[in-house]
Structure formats: C-alpha cells, structure tokens
Image (cartoon, grey):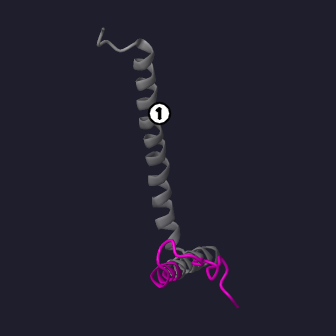
Amino acid sequence: MSRRRSSVDGVADLLAQLTYVGTYGVAFGVTLPLAFVARKAAAFDNPLVRGFKQGAADAAGDADRFLSEVQAGAKSAPAGAPGASASGLSVFPAA
C-alpha cells in the first residue's frame, strides 16, 4: 500500500484552501470599508441615520425580549415535558 495521496485529493485540498482564503479576503475587504463608512455616516444627523439608529435599537430590544421569553419558558417547563410548548412566544408583540 502506498501512503501517497492521489492528485485528485491534492487538487481538492488546494481548491478548498483557495476558497476559504478567498472568501475570507472578500469578507474582510468588504466589511472593513463598510464599517468605516458606517462610522462616518453615523456622525450625520438626518432622518435616515436616525431611522437606522432607532431600527437597530428596536431590533436589539426585540431580541432581548424574545430571549427573555425563551429563557422564562425553559425555566417553567422541564425539557421534554408533555404539553410544554412555545405557543406563548410570538414574533410580533401582543398589542
């Protein structure tokens, strides 16, 4: 038996590494400039920026509220208990 890898395995590994490094480079190359632009745009006081800030604050509040409900539901019902459901949880808050 030979311990040599086939050339197909070598090409597959090379393509996997190139894909990983390429997507990492693109993600970093896109995210960093956008972060700088967003930081500069946040300094402006106009309706668009205020809307983005309010939307981000609302989204964070909704996520916190959802997680609190999930944690409260998990504490009140043992895992796998019959009849335990998340029917009280809703994506939209009750009015």
Side of 91 relative to 53 (left or right): right
Instruction: Give SS at disc 1.
Output: helix
Q: In front: 39, or 65?
A: 65
Q: Is residue 88 magenta?
A: yes
State which region is magenta.
68-95
The residue singled out by tag 1 in the image is 19
How many labels sit on residues?
Answer: 1
Locate the N terminus by quadrant.
top left
> Looking at the image, is 28 positioned above or below residue 19?
below
Q: Residue at x 47, y 47 (%)?
A: 27
Looking at the image, residue 8 sits to the left or right of residue 44; the answer is left
**Which quadrant of the rendered structure holds the C terminus?**
bottom right
For residue 66, above or below residue 25: below
Residue 7 covered by magenta stretch: no
The residue lying at 45 percent from left, 60 percent from top is 36
Query: Residue 42: where, in percent of width, then height?
Result: 51, 71
Which quarter of the figure has residue 5?
top left
Relative depth, front residue between 29 and 61: 61
Q: Main secondary structure of the magenta part?
A: loop
Q: Position of residue 51 (x, y in %)?
A: 62, 77
Taking the spot 42% from the left edge, 19% from the top edge, the residue there is 9
Q: Residue furthest bottom?
A: 95
In the rendering, at what x and y percent does residue 19 appear? Answer: 47, 33
Identified by mark 1, the residue type is: Thr
- In the picture as drawn, the residue positioned furthest to the top comes out as 1
Whole-percent x, y for residue 92 in the image: 67, 80
7 to the left or right of 2: right
The outermost residue toward the front is 82
Disc 1: CA contacts within 10 A as few (<14), some (14-19) or many (>=20): few
